[in-house]
Image (cartoon, rainbow, N blue to C red):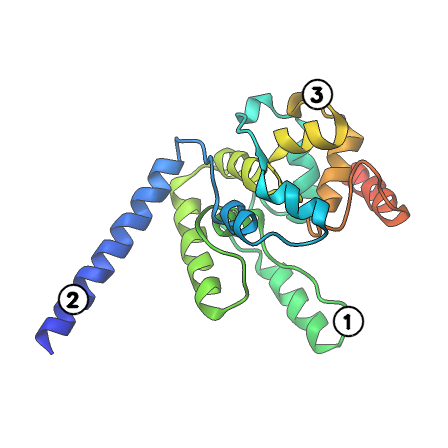
Amino acid sequence: MRLIVRILKWAAILFFASTFAAVLIYRFVPVRVTPLMVIRAINPQGTVKQQERERHWRHQWVPVDRISRWMPAAVVASEDGHFYSHHGFDFKAIEKAVEERRSGKRKRGASTISQQTAKNVFLWPGRSWLRKGLETYFTILIEIAWPKERIMEVYLNSIEMGAGVYGIEAAAGFYFNTTADKLTKRQCALIAVSLPSPLRMDPARPSAYVQKRARQIMRYM
C-alpha cells in the first residue's frame, strides 16, 4: 500500500511539474505542432481532397504584430466577446448555454478563446469528462502564466481553419492568396465566422449565411 501511495505521489508531482513547465515554455516558444495536426494527418476526415490536404498540413507561425489588427477583433466579436475581461471562463455564456439546452433550443457553444487555446495546444479532440477536466486545468494555467496578447497569438496560430489549414498565416494564403498582416476587415470576419465549422465552411466561397454573419461581426468589430 505504501508503494502504491508513493508511486501515485510521484506520478502527481511529475504531471504537475511537466505540465506547468510546458505552459511556461510555450509562453515564449512558438507552437509548431499541435495534437490535432498529428491526429488529422494520421486519421484524415472528409472528402478525398480534404484527406490529402490533412496529410500534408499547412502551418506557419507568425508573431501577433504580423497579423492584421482586424483578426483579433473578429474572433473576439465572433467567439468570445468577454475575452479581455474574463479569467478563462465566461460563466454568463455557460449559464445561457445550459438554459438553452434545457429549453430545447439550438445548442450554444460556451468555450472561451482561452479554453480553445488550451484544448488546441495541449489536448486531443473529444467530449469526455477527462478531457474537459484537463481543458479546465490547462485554461487556468495559461491564464495565470500568459498575458491575454500571448493567448490570442497562440490561438490565432494554432486553431484549425480548414482541412489541413492551421493558423492565420496558412489561412490567409490558402483562402485569399495573401499574408496574415494584409487581411482586410471583411476577410477577417469571414474567417472568424467559419471557425466553428472549418471543415464545412469556406471563407473564400461564403454561403449566404456566412456573408450575413460576417456583416454582423464587422459591425461588432
Q: Identify whether 29 is placed above or below 65.
A: below
Marks 2 and 3, the one that precedes in the sequence:
2
Marks 1 and 3, the one that precedes in the sequence:
1
* Residue at image mark 3: 182
Q: How far apart, in angstroms, are the residues tagged by discs 1 and 3?
A: 39 Å
* Residue at image mark 2: 7
The x and y percentages for residue 112 are 58, 51
Going by the numbered disc 2, the residue's amino acid type is Ile
The residue depicted at 77 percent of the width and 32 percent of the height is: 187
Residue 203 in the figure: left or right of residue 42: right
Is 56 or 181 nearer to us in this picture? 56
Going by the numbered disc 1, the residue's amino acid type is Lys
Residues at circles 1 and 3 in contact by the CB criterion of under 8 Å: no
The image quarter in which residue 99 lies: bottom right
- Residue 221 visible in the current orientation: no
Is 1 or 90 nearer to us in this picture? 1
Q: Residue 150 carries which label?
A: none
Q: How far apart, in angstroms, are the residues tagged by discs 2 and 3?
A: 53 Å
Residues at circles 1 and 2 in contact by the CB criterion of under 8 Å: no
Q: Which mark is residue 105?
A: 1
Q: How far apart, in angstroms, are the residues tagged by discs 1 and 2?
A: 47 Å
The residue depicted at 25 percent of the width and 50 percent of the height is: 17
Question: Which residue lies most toward the left here?
Answer: 2
